[in-house]
């Protein structure tokens, strides 16, 4: 079984041969490159659910700010919830998508320890959700489409979060999003962690990057609660059906944005182009729908989610 | 200050036990108390005031006018959309919970009246897979609200839930969005929603429908919060204050309107609902 390390070693070997002067190694190099391509295809085209979880959390994966810089222009950040403070794990602002103004909500993880401290490892706090709601309402007032970039392992669990009623903040956002009189699109770019993600994700269109995940609970959390064994995260990842292809099959998301072989971080430029294309297409489509029709469709979309059977009334 | 574990319900099943004994021993004060009196007292110990666990059927009995409850509509059962198996198959867990509780899922919904005021009520039941909200609970909350809108009745939800039902994956998470979307219809129709939070009201239920009452009441002894204690303790690596996520914590931090003793819940609901009669 090939793993990512083998590929890295092979890549390093090829690079080493290239650096050697004085000998013609082109034959050897091209032979190894072919081998690398085959191995890469083999490894990445049959990803297990757990491998996708790992790609979704890959430290080199592009984060929201990377896409904000490449997909949008003129990002104009709006800070603070006007009550308590400013959450650096959820950014809000105005930006342009192909010249057109949109309101943007974006969950941002940190790259360094220092940055992660500031951003609470990408976990959103009540301050962030309330800032998001402020931006939603602003967007509605000026008829800007709303775009959410989702990437969080979950809402931040802490004493302050509970004191500031994080559950209530999420609930209020859901209520606001359900009634926004503007087109709304949510894209899960990495991790879609439960209520912490849904709080900016109740949208007309829900898209996922190919290797993103979206779940009611982390695989580790489910493993601890249901299997009583943290080592069962792999099994939990599969059972929870949290990957983009599975959620598309379940009819819970609308579109998958393809990633390059091995994940978005292998070629961010290609990923950015695909994200932009898909996003523009959906925003354009939604903008053409009369508002009452759009809101009705949104209502029916969420009203109809669920699978159950009817029991005969005479059954015990 | 109580000498006993603060504000935790004792999991005593008053009349679920098959035995026919007339007396039971309160685990809090140790008194022998007459079972029928406990039941008539909304499962509160007549001797020391400790709360015993109340099933959804018992709650309905203690809140609604006698004989006024009329269960609503179709009986729905979970479909196991993910064919979920952990240490046990989800289907097995559902079947066991159904057998244990006599319920189809973790909620009972129906029409009824409180001091003659017509309402639609939903009562969640913690015994059924932790009162968790999956497709069935979400759907039944929506149907209850829709009946309330059609009949022009107020809606009362008594929450008792650990959160979303893990075994239905994202379908469960999205029940938060679904119930909230439907809750808006109640507001648009000018009908009141009174949310009653009991032990426990947490996770996806607290972070959606239960927090959106026009009036939010907590029963004395409730646990109210988003994340579980253990999760928070692991994150911040320190012990949490004793009254953390209790009803008094929620009141102190502006998350609920009032704390009500279980014995007074019926009168409280009647009083609150009264303000809205003919309001719009």
Image: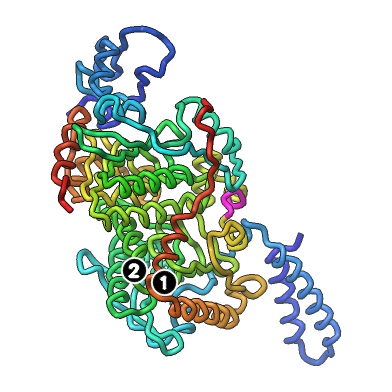
User: Is residue A97 positioned above or below A296 on the image?
Assistant: below
Q: Residue at x 39, y 65 (%)?
A: A200
Q: Residue at x 38, y 80 (%)?
A: A102
Q: Which residue does the numbered mark 1 point to in the structure image?
A: A184
What segment carries the magenta color?
A: A237-241
User: Is residue A283 positioned above or below A201 on the image?
Assistant: below
Instruction: Chain letter for mark 1, please.
Output: A
Q: Does dot 2 land on a helix, a strand or a loop?
A: loop
Q: Is residue B151 visible?
A: yes
Q: Which mark is residue A180?
A: 2
Residue A10 located within the stretch drawn in magenta? no
Q: Is residue A54 visible?
A: no
Instruction: Chain letter for mark 2, please.
Output: A
Between residue B89 and residue B145, name the one nearer to us: B145
Residue A160 at x, y = what percent? 27, 54
Both marks 1 and 2 on one chain = yes
Residue B260 at x, y = what percent? 18, 35
At label 1, counting other C-alpha atoms closer than 10 Å, the crowd grade (few under 14, some 14-19, many 20 or more) is many
CB contact under 8 Å: marks 1 and 2: yes
Residue B148 at x, y = what percent? 31, 46
Quadrant of image for the N terminus of chain A: bottom right
Tell me which corner region of the image, top left, top right, bottom left or bottom right, holds residue B68: top left
């Amino acid at each position: 079984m090939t793993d990512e390390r083998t590929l890295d070693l092979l890549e390093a070997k090829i690079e080493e041969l290239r650096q050697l002067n004085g000998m013609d190694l082109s034959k050897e190099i091209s032979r190894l490159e072919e081998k690398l391509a085959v191995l890469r295809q083999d490894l990445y085209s049959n990803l297990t659910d757990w491998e996708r979880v790992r790609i979704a959390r890959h430290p080199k994966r592009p984060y929201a700010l990377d896409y904000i810089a490449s997909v949008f222009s003129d990002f104009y950040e709006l800070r603070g919830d006007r009550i308590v403070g400013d959450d650096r794990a959820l950014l809000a602002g105005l930006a342009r998508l192909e010249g057109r103004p949109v309101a943007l909500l974006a969950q941002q993880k940190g790259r360094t320890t220092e940055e992660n401290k500031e951003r609470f490892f990408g976990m959103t706090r009540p301050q962030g959700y309330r800032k998001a709601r402020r931006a939603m309402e602003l967007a509605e007032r000026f008829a800007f489409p709303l775009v959410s970039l989702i990437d969080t392992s979950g809402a931040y669990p802490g004493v302050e979060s509970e004191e500031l009623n994080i559950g209530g903040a999420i609930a209020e956002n859901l209520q606001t999003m359900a009634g926004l009189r503007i087109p709304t699109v949510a894209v899960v770019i990495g991790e879609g962690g439960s209520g912490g993600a849904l709080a900016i994700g109740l949208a007309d269109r829900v898209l996922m990057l190919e290797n993103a995940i979206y779940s009611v609970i982390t695989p580790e959390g489910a493993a601890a609660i249901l299997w009583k064994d943290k080592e069962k995260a792999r099994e939990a990842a599969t059972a929870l059906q949290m990957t983009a292809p599975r959620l598309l099959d379940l009819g819970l998301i609308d579109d998958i944005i393809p990633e390059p072989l091995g994940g978005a971080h292998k070629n961010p430029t290609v990923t950015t182009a695909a994200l932009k294309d898909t996003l523009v297409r959906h925003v354009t489509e939604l903008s053409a729908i009369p508002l009452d029709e759009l809101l009705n469709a949104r209502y029916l979309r969420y009203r109809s989610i669920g699978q159950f059977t009817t029991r005969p009334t005479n059954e015990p | 200050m109580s000498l006993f574990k603060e504000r935790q319900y004792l999991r005593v099943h008053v009349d679920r036990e098959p035995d026919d004994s007339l007396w039971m021993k309160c685990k809090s004060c140790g008194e022998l108390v007459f079972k029928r009196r406990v039941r008539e007292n909304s499962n509160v110990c007549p001797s020391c005031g400790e709360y015993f666990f109340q099933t959804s059927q018992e709650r309905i009995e203690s809140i609604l006018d006698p004989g006024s409850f009329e269960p609503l509509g179709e009986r729905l059962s979970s479909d196991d959309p993910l064919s979920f198996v952990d240490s046990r198959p989800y289907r097995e867990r559902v079947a066991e919970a159904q057998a244990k509780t006599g319920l189809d899922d973790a909620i009972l919904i129906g029409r009824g009246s409180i001091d003659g005021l017509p309402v639609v009520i939903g009562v969640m039941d913690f015994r059924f897979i932790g009162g968790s909200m999956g497709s069935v609970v979400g759907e039944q909350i929506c149907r209850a609200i829709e009946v309330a809108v059609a009949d022009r009745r107020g809606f009362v939800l008594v929450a008792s839930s650990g959160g979303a039902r893990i075994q239905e994956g994202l379908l469960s998470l999205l029940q938060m969005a679904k119930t909230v979307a439907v809750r808006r219809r109640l507001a648009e129709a000018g009908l009141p929603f009174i949310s009653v939070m009991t032990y426990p009201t947490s996770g996806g239920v607290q972070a959606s429908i239960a927090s959106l009452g026009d009036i939010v009441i907590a029963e004395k002894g409730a646990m109210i919060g988003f994340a579980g204690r253990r999760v928070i303790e692991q994150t911040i690596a320190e012990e949490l204050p004793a009254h953390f996520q209790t009803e008094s914590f929620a009141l102190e931090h502006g998350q609920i309107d009032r704390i009500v003793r279980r014995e007074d819940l019926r009168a409280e609901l009647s009083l609150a609902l009264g303000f809205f009669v003919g309001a719009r």
